[in-house]
Image (spheres, rainbow, N blue to C red):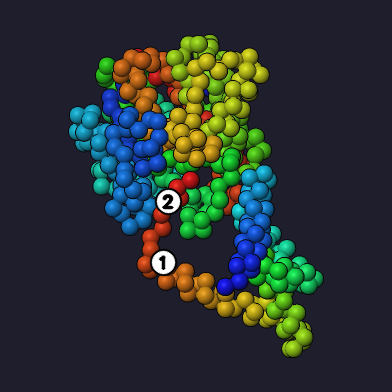
Amino acid sequence: MKKVGNQSYILNKPVNIAATASIVGPKEKEGPLHQFFDQCLEDEFWGESSWEKAESKLVKETVSMAISKSGIASSDIDFCFAGDLLNQCIASSFGLRETNIPFIGLFGACSTFIESMIIASSLIDGDFATNTICTASSHFCSAEKQFRFPLELGNQRPPSSQWTVTGSGAAILTKEGTGPFITTFTPGKIVDMGIKDANNMGAAMAGAAEDTLITHFKDTGRNPNYYDVILTGDLGHIGKDILIDLASSKGYNIRANYNDCGVLMFDKEKQDTHSGGSGCGCIATVFSGYVYQMLQEKKYKKVLMIATGALMNSTSTQQGESIPGIAHAISIEL
Amino acid sequence: MDWMMIFKAFIIGGIICVIGQILIDKTKLTPARILVAYVTIGAILGGLGIYKYLIDFAGCGATVPLTGFGSLLSKGTISEVQTTGFIGAFTGGIKSAAGGISAAIFFGYIASLVSKPKIKKQ
């Protein structure tokens, strides 16, 4: 692995993405990407007694589906990197407690999926691991309870709010394989735009996305045209527009090939999801479902995934703190 | 049945809720702050003796929204101070609202036994 520029890394030997799996909830099933997911649930509980248990089941089933698709024995997997949005990441740790795979819990808010892929591909590139699994999940009902209000309160959602994706995505990263490959990554810095509204996450994270995007281009000498598509995680409609403006003010026009997973996930008009999807599960399922299939069908050959995260909790919001943002980028190429 | 009263309750209760909707859509106020503001405004208007005209006019259209709860608190406080003195400032509000509060807890508990929370549709 070689460091280029300020904070980007080019892998000596590109890391193979052997298989992915994605399971989403009923709202995502009604969305435009439904045919790309492995499984769509009929209800949010999935036969469990709580939403937290349902989210753990999402993680568990997605991981076992990804493992069986890859054909790799779970005993041959060196690490499992996982994270979610619940306190102390219980969706991941409870969901994966029976896997018997060395487990590293991560928290990068909604950037967790790409964060886990950055760490996993570094370890594989350094010969510290051969096969790893990366996964992240979120659940609308448990996230509302965690970050805003319990659903039982029945409160109204403002127009700038986003809809946490119910879903889990998993990817198996291996040393050997035929691609698609992770070739480059740019871990992001924390950027605080001073936004204090927990219902306007897109605006809070756009600055971090811009910082990572521009740094990636400067470090690698690439420009937006290098990629077939540039996808951010969950900036939503508001954050997407802000990022386009911020990038163009720095001289990078990303309008032609840029989109956001939160924008792609739902039909804004028909589903009344306001500013679009969000959550760890957003980029995890859109990548594991839609993007991975596009790569396999060679419709995309070079993809830049930028996962965005809002690094706040409900206490910091109640204490009037602003929301620091983070964004991690990886390039995936055939 | 007093159809005119039902109509007036619908209009006044509706207007109070529309104001809340506008506050959610057009300001950065959180739902919790809007709820607290409604109780506070109701308490002030009730304390000044203004809110009772709205109750006379619209009945439940004025008492059911949170502003009605606020006015009930101040009304109870004032009457309790008049009968028991200074301590009434601390007991009157809760006393007057006791029926509503206990009913909310009781019926909330009953509802939780027979129903399961669901995702909102939008």
Q: Residue at x 29, y 33 (%)?
A: A38
Q: Nearer the viewer, residue A191 or A157?
A: A157
Q: Nearer the viewer, residue A85 or A291?
A: A291
* Residue contact at pointers 1 and 2, CB within 8 angstroms: no
Bin the neighbour count of mark 2 within 10 Å (Cα to Cα): few under 14, some 14-19, many 20 and up: some
Q: Amino acid at mark 1?
A: Ser
- Which residue is at the far bottom? B84
Establish if A78 lies above or below A251.
Answer: below
Q: Residue at x 75, y 79 (%)?
A: B78
Q: Quadrant of residue B62?
A: bottom right
Numbered badge on residue A60 = none
Q: Amino acid at mark 2?
A: Ile
**Residue B92 visible within the image:** yes
> The residue tagged with tag 1: helix, strand or loop?
helix
Determine whether, in the image, residue A100 is placed left or right of residue A197: left
Q: Quadrant of residue A294?
A: top left
Residue A101 is situated, as x and y percent measured from the top left of the image, at: 27, 40
Q: Nearer the viewer, residue B68 or A28?
A: B68
Residue corresponding to mark 2? B119
Q: Give the quadrant of the C terminus of chain A.
A: top left
Residue A39 is situated, as x and y percent measured from the top left of the image, at: 29, 37
Establish if A179 lies above or below A31.
Answer: above
Q: Residue at x 65, y 70 (%)?
A: B59
- Which residue is at the far right? B48
Residue corresponding to mark 1? B112
